[in-house]
Structure formats: structure tokens, C-alpha cells
Image (spheres, rainbow, N blue to C red):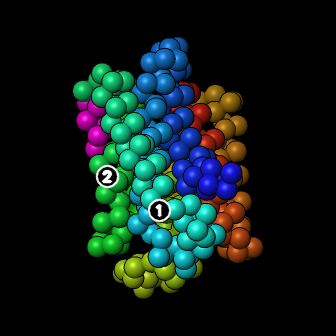
Amino acid sequence: MRVVRAAIQLLRPYTTFLAFLSILVPTLYRTKSFLFSALQAIPLLFISMCTFLINDLDDVEKDKINHPSRPLPRGDISPVLVVIIYYTCLAAALLTIRLGVQNQRAEFLYYALLTLAISYGYIVEYLPIFKPVYVAGTSALPILILIALYPPETMLYLMAGAVFAFILGRELCLDLMDRPGDAVSALHRVHPSRLATIALSLEVAGLLLVSPLIATVTDLLIGTIMTALIALAWLCWFKHHRFRAATNLMKAAMYVGLYFLIS
């Protein structure tokens, strides 16, 4: 039971599910076909799983410092089993892209996303200063996939920009929390308070990019909820120094923001 629980934790269900929903929800809204929508979304699920599994395998030594409670540094699951799960997810990602995605432009973006995701470790190791931008750009690719599927919908470009800003801000905050075990880069020379201000300002920039999409009372309500979550993240980070809570609030704002993919 401990191994199963550890495997689930490694797969980061809350984040992988967000990637899955980012394709499933807007596609289902537009086509009303659950089968088609699921076929477009399932590859994102396996790609996200691959990302987290390979990242945890690469970062075992760092996680002994930054995240000692994670399954691998704690010894709850063997690296051999994690490698088996990783290759299973990788095969599933390749298979579901090949069989489920018919749009050629979208198919290319799926493969690009998979390639970038599993190459993340090289950026961390050799080009750490680019890591936040790399993660944010890769995370925005699902929205570019939607653009490939529905090219006339120009509002999706705003959403791609918003996702980039939200992820970049959150990633900078996560990097601040992980500084003790991470490779030193030029970002380490930036004072933590200043970098956190830049990061939270990027969250606000994401809200501003979403704001032109507000056209109804419901849109306004969703936008207000997102704004409240980001405001709470500011308070948690700067006033209460509850850094993990702040980054969780940022993730919650992105979950709520999925609404604008169907508005």
C-alpha cells in the first residue's frame, strides 16, 4: 500500500489532472464529443506523468535537501520501479498521440511538448537560469495545441500568454523555495524579496491578460475569484511567509482560469 501511495504521489495527480483538463474541457465544450475530447486530452495526462517521474529520478540527491519527504528520497519506492512506470507512461504517451490525434499541426505540438518535457533535466543541470522560462513556455504548449485545433479563436492567444505569465511567476516562487539544493545560477544573485515581487507581479500580468475575455457577469465573477486567490497568495508570501500555501493558491487560480477556455 505504501508503494502505491508513493507512486500516486510521484505522478502529481493535481497537476497532471490540470494539464488533462486544459484540453478536455475546452474541446468537449466545442465538439460535445467526449470520445474525441478524451483522445485529445489523454496524451497530456501521460506527458505530464513522464515529466514528473523523470524529474524526480533526476533530482533524488537535490530532493534529499529540498524535499526529503518525497517518496524517492524517503525510500518509499525503488528507483527501478519508478523507471518502469516512467517507460510505461512514455509508451502510453507516444501511442495515444499516434492513435488519437489526427490534426497534423496539433500532433507536432504534442511531440514537441513530450520532447521538451522529458529534456527538462538538461536545462536544470546545464542552463539553470533558463529553467523558469523553459517551464513556462512548455506549460503554455497545451494552449497552442488548442489554437492548432481551433485556429479562428484568437482569444486563445491571450490565454497562452496568461498561462505563460502564471506559470513563470509560480516557477520563480518554487525556485526561491528550492534554492538550498538547486544549481547556482544568476537568479541566485537577485534578492529573494525582489525576485518574489517580480514573480507575484507576473501573476498579476496573467490576470491582466485574462481581463479582455470578461464579457458577462459570470466572467466577472470568475475573474474576481482569480484575483482574490492571487491577492491571498501575495499575503501568504509576503506577510505570513507561508510559501507553500502561496504557490498552492497560484495553482488554484489556474484551475479556476480554465473557465476562460470555454467562455
Spot occupied by residue 57 in the image (x, y as percentages of width and height): 44, 63
Helix, strand or loop under label 1: helix
Rendering coords of residue 263 (x, y %)? 56, 27
Instruction: Count all numbered tags in the image, as a single digit.
Output: 2
Residue 23 lies, in percent from the top left, at 47, 32
Q: For the residue carrying disc 1, how many other residues have a C-alpha within 10 Å: few (<14), some (14-19), or many (20+)?
A: some
Tag 2 secondary structure:
helix
Looking at the image, residue 244 lies above or below residue 28: below
Measured Cα–Cα span from mark 1 to mark 2: 22 Å
* Image position, residue 213 (x, y; %): 53, 35
- Residue 136 visible somewhere in the drawing: no
Looking at marks 1 and 2 on the same chain, the residue that comes earlier in the sequence is marked by 1
Please report the residue visible at 53 percent of the width from the left and 45 percent of the height from the top. Answer: 16
Quick check: 84 above or below 104?
below
Left or right side of 29 for 36: left
Magenta range is 105-112
Residue placed under numbered mark 1 in the picture:
79
Q: Residue furthest top?
A: 32
Count residues near mark 2 (Cα–Cα under 10 Å), then give few for <14, some for 14-19, many for 20+: some
Question: Is 4 covered by the magenta stretch?
Answer: no
Q: Is residue 6 left or right of residue 55?
A: right
Residue sitting at 46 percent across and 31 percent down?
41
Whether residue 54 sits left or right of residue 125 in the image: it is right
**Residue 116, numbered circle:** 2
Residue type at mark 1 is Pro
